[in-house]
């Protein structure tokens, strides 16, 4: 579904699970979209929560703009206002953790719980401007995009190429969705390079929010086979005021930390009902 924001930009979002129910606002990874949230539909229904995910600027048909973590948080808040939602638990997957934390820091009065899955910390400091970083990364991204060929109308072939790029355990969790769903997922995520490039560049520099402003409890989930996320748990634990609960799942990779644990994650976040 699409909605126009007050500045005229369009964003595309997905909502599923229980309605009415407490809202879990989900920030997708990179490159990814609202479609990854759809894999949590049944878990959201079972947990009695309403799961909401918005494509960030530059992903799918969401209008590209000069976004930052704080501006993405403002966009999400505007959508919550349109929905008449006062408070939500927020959940970020991978690079989406940066945006979930930005929401919790910018709107602590509206955030019940903060959940981070497979969350990296910032990259090494750089003297590049945001635009220079995006330009530097563009050729490699476009080479990868050409290899995946998201415009191929053969869903089975597109899905096979994409899944071959993933760790086998992650691919095995997506394969049951079917070729059409996997093809739609990757097409929406990478058809426009601006979303990915901006995400990848923003995570390399200081974020325009103060994580010390987060006031809610936080939960961090990751797999022990995701070295970057495991290494970043101390970074997050040091900067979030707490309390913080960190769980490292054995024999689990990056995407599997979300797809295998949707029921537990949404049940935990859905307990913030009052």
Image (cartoon, rainbow, N blue to C red):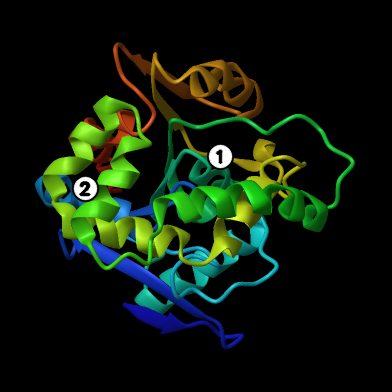
Q: Position of residue 40 (x, y in %)?
A: 21, 48
246 up-or-down from 241: above or below: above
Q: Position of residue 181 (x, y in %)?
A: 20, 58
- Between 148 and 84, the one lying in front of the other is 148
The residue that appears at 61% across and 28% down in the rendered structure is 241
215 up-or-down from 36: above or below: above
Q: Quadrant of residue 61?
A: bottom left
The residue that appears at 15% across and 49% down in the rendered structure is 177
User: What residue does disc 1 label?
Assistant: 215
User: What residue does disc 2 label?
Assistant: 40
User: Which label is found at residue 153?
Assistant: none
- Between 225 and 48, the one lying in front of the other is 225
Q: Position of residue 46 (x, y in %)?
A: 10, 46
**Number of other residues with Cα within 10 Å of mark 1, as a class: few under 14, some 14 to 19, many 20 or more:** many
Q: Is residue 21 left or right of residue 206?
A: left
245 up-or-down from 41: above or below: above
Q: How many marks?
A: 2
Q: Is residue 206 left or right of residue 114?
A: right
Viewer-nearest of discs 1 and 2: 2
């Amino acid at each position: 579904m699409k909605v126009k924001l007050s500045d005229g930009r369009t964003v595309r979002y997905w909502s599923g699970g229980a309605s009415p129910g407490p809202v879990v606002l989900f920030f997708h990874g990179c490159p990814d979209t609202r479609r990854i949230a759809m894999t949590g539909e049944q878990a959201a229904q079972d947990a009695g929560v309403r799961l909401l995910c918005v494509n960030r600027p530059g992903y799918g048909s969401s209008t590209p703009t000069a976004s930052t973590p704080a501006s993405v948080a403002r966009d999400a808040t505007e959508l919550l206002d349109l929905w008449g939602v006062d408070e939500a638990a927020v959940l970020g997957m991978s690079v989406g953790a940066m945006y979930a934390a930005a929401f919790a820091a910018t709107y602590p009065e509206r955030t019940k719980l903060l959940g981070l899955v497979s969350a990296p910390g910032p990259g090494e400091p750089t003297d590049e401007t945001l635009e220079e970083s995006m330009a530097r990364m563009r050729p490699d991204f476009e080479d990868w995009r050409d290899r995946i060929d998201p415009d191929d109308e053969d869903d089975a072939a597109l899905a096979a190429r994409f899944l071959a790029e993933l760790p086998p355990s992650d691919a095995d969790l997506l394969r049951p969705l079917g070729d059409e769903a996997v093809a739609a997922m990757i097409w929406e995520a990478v058809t426009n390079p601006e979303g990915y490039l901006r995400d990848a560049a923003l995570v390399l520099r200081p974020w325009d929010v103060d994580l010390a402003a987060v006031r809610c409890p936080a939960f961090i989930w990751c797999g022990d086979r995701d070295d970057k996320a495991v290494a970043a748990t101390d970074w997050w634990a040091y900067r979030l005021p707490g309390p913080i609960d960190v769980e490292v799942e054995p024999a689990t990779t990056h995407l599997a930390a979300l797809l295998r644990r949707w029921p537990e994650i949404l049940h935990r976040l859905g307990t913030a009902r009052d």
